[in-house]
């Protein structure tokens, strides 16, 4: 039976068809390293938790279903998920990536350059001609964040698929910012989707998690082999937390997006704000592409203040909104990308992208929108 997304968030683990011990209506936490063999050459279905664990299995099934995948692996955090996906590439491979990427992903690419001679060209992937120009003989993959972090650039994924097909490339998409509630990159042609499950999927700022989802079994099998060999497996209790978080993904994201729309419009009219980067504003350059490929605009806003003093004042004075480095949870968080999420990026590159001392990023939570606006208002006054 095909389920609507709100239903799949709750029952997507096949719960309806499944008998958990004592008919528990949620997936129990199988906090166990190993499983007894019923006999020689026989298995209960689980032998050792690095290879498979029932709590993790249910979580992987739910996320796989939400992302319309053919296989999913739950990892310790988003970075290990991205690392795992990039293990698909041979040493010496070249990647064309979105230039506006989470700073940790850039750090990983630098590490891969050192360890495996993997080269990355960073371009504005919302401009297809830049992507085409950057492709060379050794290019093996396109790596896309859309909307990007923190400048909210939107990349047309169907166009990326066309380019990937022309050159035989793997299309890898980080879908953290919109989550499968709003966007399914596999439906748009992605081969591999990665997530920081720490963000919207888990949604409560209380555990780290990551996911890799593939569009076919072959890719899944290659990744699963690496996964079980190296073991970046999400622990059973963390799987339980993410399973619980996902149950409310739909209502959280609807509320977060509604709040974000109101706050983005309010910020736009504020005299101390010069620019607002929110994909859901009609004048955002990625608005039309986003409408075509996603079911919503999400709840991430970046904005630019008139000067550095104002940005610092806002960070120091906010009371309900917390100055902290993450996103996607029920609590609204404000980040200073220049020194936090993108502190690793070379200053010149950062400045070129617009990640300067006046840029703030707001992850809108599920609090009352008027309270959040009042909090921002008093912070701007100082
Ligand atoms: C878009 C994006 N991808 C990946 C990551 C890494 O995820 P994690 O912190 O769970 O390792 C982050 C973290 O902020 C992120 O924002």
Image (cartoon, rainbow, N blue to C red):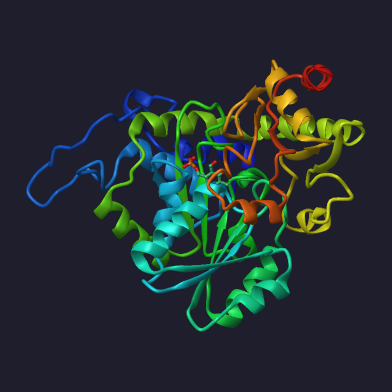
Q: Is residue 21 left or right of residue 200?
A: left
Query: 330 above or below 350?
Result: above
Query: Which quarter of the picture shows residue 122?
Result: bottom right
Above or below — where is 97 with respect to 77?
below
Considering the image in quadrants, where does the C terminus appear? Answer: top right
- Relative to residue 278, is residue 266 depicted above or below? above
Relative side of 151 to 54, left or right: right
Q: Residue furthest left?
A: 40
**What is the total number of numbered labels drawn onto the structure image?**
0
242 or 259: nearer the viewer = 259
The residue located at (51%, 41%) in the rendering is: 12
Residue 296 at least partly seen: yes
Residue at horizontal 57 percent and vertical 32 percent from the top:
325
Above-or-below relation of 306 to 224: above
Q: Position of residue 380 (x, y in %)?
A: 82, 23
Visible residue check, residue 4: no
Q: Name the image quarter holding residue 143.
A: bottom right
Q: Nearer the viewer, residue 10 or 74?
A: 74
Is residue 8 left or right of 380 when viewed as pictured? left
Give the residue displayed 45% in from the left and 30% down from the top.
Answer: 207
**Rendered location of residue 377, percent (x, y):** 83, 20
| Residue 361, position as x, y percentages in the image | 69, 37
Q: Residue 177 vs residue 56: left or right?
A: right
**Residue 171 screen position, x and y as percent:** 55, 66
The foreground one among 375 and 29 is 375
């Amino acid at each position: 039976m095909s389920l609507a997304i709100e239903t799949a968030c709750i029952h997507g683990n096949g719960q309806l068809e499944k008998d958990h011990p004592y008919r528990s209506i949620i997936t129990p936490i199988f906090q166990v390293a190993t499983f007894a063999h019923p006999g020689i050459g026989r298995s209960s279905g689980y032998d050792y938790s690095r290879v498979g664990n029932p709590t993790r299995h249910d979580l992987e099934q739910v996320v796989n279903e939400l992302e319309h995948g053919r296989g999913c692996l739950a990892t310790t955090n988003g970075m290990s998920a991205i690392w795992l996906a990039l293990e698909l590439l041979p040493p010496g491979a070249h990647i064309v990536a979105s230039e506006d990427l989470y700073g940790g992903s850039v750090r990983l690419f630098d590490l891969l350059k050192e360890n495996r001679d993997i080269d990355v060209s960073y371009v504005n992937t919302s401009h297809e001609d830049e992507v085409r120009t950057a492709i060379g003989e050794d290019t093996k993959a396109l790596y896309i964040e859309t909307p990007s972090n923190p400048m909210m650039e939107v990349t047309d994924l169907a166009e990326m698929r066309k380019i990937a097909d022309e050159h035989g490339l793997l299309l890898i998409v980080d879908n953290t910012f919109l989550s499968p509630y709003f966007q399914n990159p596999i439906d748009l042609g992605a081969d591999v989707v990665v997530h920081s499950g720490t963000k919207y999927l888990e949604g409560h700022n209380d555990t780290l998690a990551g996911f890799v989802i593939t569009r076919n079994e072959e890719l899944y099998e290659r990744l699963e082999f690496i996964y079980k060999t190296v073991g970046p497996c999400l622990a059973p209790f963390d799987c339980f937390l993410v399973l619980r978080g996902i149950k409310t993904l739909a209502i959280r994201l609807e509320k977060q997006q509604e709040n974000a729309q109101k706050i983005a419009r309010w910020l736009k009219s504020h005299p101390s704000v010069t620019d607002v980067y929110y994909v859901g504003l009609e004048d955002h350059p990625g608005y039309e592409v986003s409408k075509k490929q996603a079911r919503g605009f999400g709840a991430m806003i970046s904005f630019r203040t008139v000067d550095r003093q104002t940005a610092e004042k806002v960070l120091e004075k906010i009371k309900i909104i917390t100055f902290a480095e993450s996103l996607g949870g029920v609590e609204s968080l404000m980040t200073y990308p220049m020194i936090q999420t993108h502190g690793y990026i070379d200053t010149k590159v950062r400045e070129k992208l617009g990640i300067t001392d006046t840029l703030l990023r707001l992850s809108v939570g599920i609090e009352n929108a008027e309270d959040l606006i009042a909090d921002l208002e008093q912070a701007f006054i100082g």
